[in-house]
């Protein structure tokens, strides 16, 4: 930070802005356009990048006005990325550093991770691009097919293990302590260095104006700290004069941080996470718990939770306004709805929800919701209508539809 402070905020704003939309290697990446703040000493030839980042900051006008009474609601679509999740932002940094170490003949055979889906996709893709072996520990039968097929397609060694994510995490830490395999989970700070650039990008997209609130889904809890770090660096280096208030949103079925927050930060208790549609945050013993608490306490932050019905309904409502989001974003939207209804978030507050993965990774849960296959759910379901193949039948359905919309 002392080295970076030799340049003022205007210098950094101008430098970062000058790289947006360019193809000059490696600055066309939303991560590597901030190279000096991420991994300054790496040679550009060692960088492994798919020009990740630069994701859309979407003004969710209809959702904000219709369901929240807000005019200034935004969604940061981090899932619009190479492998369809925000994990690309951190993985480009970590795999680039491993690529550098291997070129220096350091004893690193490959890279391994425990995953609930998206981490394994990002790791396997970036390792494949660099020709580095990747090993993935996945909890058996607990991730979507779309998530499972990604590491398989990219050539990773995929171990489907009869345990949950926390069990996989324990095993990978034991394995990487014995074998020359580099640990790629967010316990590794290189991941967070990449992920923090999404926070800087939000400020950049608002022409360096700071939003009032940023809401992030939380599982292993590295990302909430990464966003804090990105915002805090911008404040300390003079690019902005304050940071937003942060909200970490958890699924009620996997909510150790929420329970810790509700206790007044008195005692943290890991728990056995129950099954949730927000499978990527189905984690009961998060490795970044201390960093997350630090971020929240220093941003006057809040922790909120979402039940399974709440998160699925929120996802359906968002999709009905033209988005196509993942269940984890549904958790964050539920947190926003609750904080808006309680008056904590005001109608004029500029608020950003971070969408962490692409909805196409979770088509089965969406299909089940709209088909009525989830007991007790489907308040906003929109199932297909079975119609006979004749003009009169089709016209009857269309008339009913048009009349219902008139109301």
Image: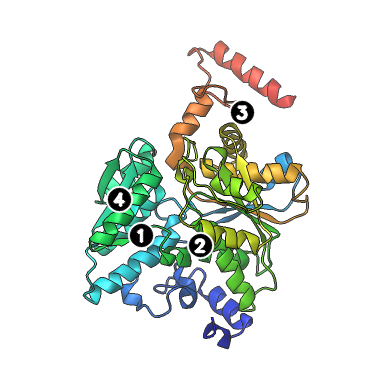
Q: Nearer the viewer, residue 27 or 355?
A: 355
Q: Quadrant of the N terminus?
A: bottom right
Residue pointed to by mark 4:
136
- 46 left or right, relative to 215: left
User: Marks 2 and 1: CB-CB under 8 Å?
Assistant: no
Q: Position of residue 85 (x, y in %)?
A: 45, 52
**Picture quarter with the C terminus:** top right
User: Would you place residue 146 above or below residue 131 in this image?
Assistant: above
Q: Secondary structure at mark 4?
A: strand
Say which of 198 and 184 sits in front: 184
Tag nearer the camera, 3 or 1? 1
Q: Mark 2 or mark 1, which has the lower sequence index?
A: 2
Q: How far is the residue under mark 2 from the one under mark 1?
A: 23 Å
Looking at the rendered structure, the secondary structure element under dot 1 is: loop
x then y, percent, for residue 10: 63, 81
> For the residues carrying marks 3 and 2, which lies nearer the camera in this image?
3
Dot 3 or dot 2, earlier in sequence:
2
Give how far apart the Cα atoms at labels 3 and 4 are: 36 Å
- For label 3, the residue is 380
- Asked whether, in this view, residue 392 is left or right of residue 63, the answer is left
Which of the two discs, 3 and 1, labels the residue nearer the N terminus?
1
Question: Which residue position holds label 1?
Answer: 184
Measured in 3D between alpha carbons, the distance from the residue under mark 3 to the one under mark 2, in whole angstroms, is: 32 Å
Query: Count of labels shown?
Result: 4
Observer-side mark, 2 or 1, equals: 1
Seen at 31% across and 73% down, the residue is 46
Q: Which mark is residue 54?
A: 2
Residue at 58 percent across and 58 percent down: it is 293
Q: How packed is label 3: few (under 14 Cα within 10 Å), some, or many (20 or more)?
A: some
């Amino acid at each position: 930070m002392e080295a970076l402070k030799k340049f003022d905020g205007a210098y950094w704003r101008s430098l970062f802005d000058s790289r947006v939309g360019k193809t000059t290697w490696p600055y066309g990446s939303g991560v590597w356009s901030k190279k000096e703040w991420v991994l300054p000493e790496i040679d550009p030839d060692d960088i492994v990048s798919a020009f990740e980042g630069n994701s859309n900051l979407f003004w969710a006008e209809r959702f904000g006005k219709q369901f929240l009474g807000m005019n200034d609601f935004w969604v940061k679509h981090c899932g619009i990325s190479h492998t369809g999740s925000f994990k690309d932002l951190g993985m480009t940094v970590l795999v680039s550093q491993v690529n550098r170490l291997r070129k220096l003949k350091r004893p690193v055979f490959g890279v391994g991770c425990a995953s609930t889906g998206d981490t394994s996709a990002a790791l396997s893709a970036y390792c494949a691009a660099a020709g580095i072996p990747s090993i993935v520990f996945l909890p058996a039968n607990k991730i979507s097919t779309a998530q499972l097929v990604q590491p398989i397609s990219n050539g990773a060694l995929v171990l489907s293990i009869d345990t949950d994510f926390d069990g996989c995490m324990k095993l990978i830490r034991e394995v990487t302590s014995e074998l020359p395999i580099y640990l790629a989970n967010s316990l590794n700070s290189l991941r967070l260095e990449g992920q923090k650039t999404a926070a800087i990008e939000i400020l950049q997209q608002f022409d360096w104006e700071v939003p009032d609130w940023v809401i992030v889904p939380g599982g292993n809890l590295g990302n909430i700290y990464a966003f804090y770090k990105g915002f805090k660096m911008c404040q300390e280096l003079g690019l902005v004069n304050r940071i937003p208030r942060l909200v970490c949103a958890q699924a009620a079925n996997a909510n150790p941080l929420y329970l810790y927050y509700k206790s007044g930060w008195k005692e943290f208790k890991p728990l056995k996470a129950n099954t949730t549609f927000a499978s990527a945050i189905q984690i009961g013993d998060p490795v970044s718990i201390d960093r997350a608490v630090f971020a929240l306490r220093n941003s006057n932050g809040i922790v909120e939770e979402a039940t399974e019905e709440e998160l699925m309904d929120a996802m359906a409502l968002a999709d009905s306004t033209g988005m196509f989001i993942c269940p984890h974003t549904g958790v964050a939207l539920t947190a926003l709805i609750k904080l808006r209804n309680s008056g904590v978030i005001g109608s004029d507050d500029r608020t950003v929800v971070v969408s962490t993965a692409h909805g196409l990774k979770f088509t089965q849960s969406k299909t089940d919701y709209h088909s009525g296959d989830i007991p007790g759910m489907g308040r906003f379901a929109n199932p297909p209508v079975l119609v006979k193949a004749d003009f009169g039948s089709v016209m009857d359905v269309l008339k009913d539809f048009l009349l219902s919309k008139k109301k």
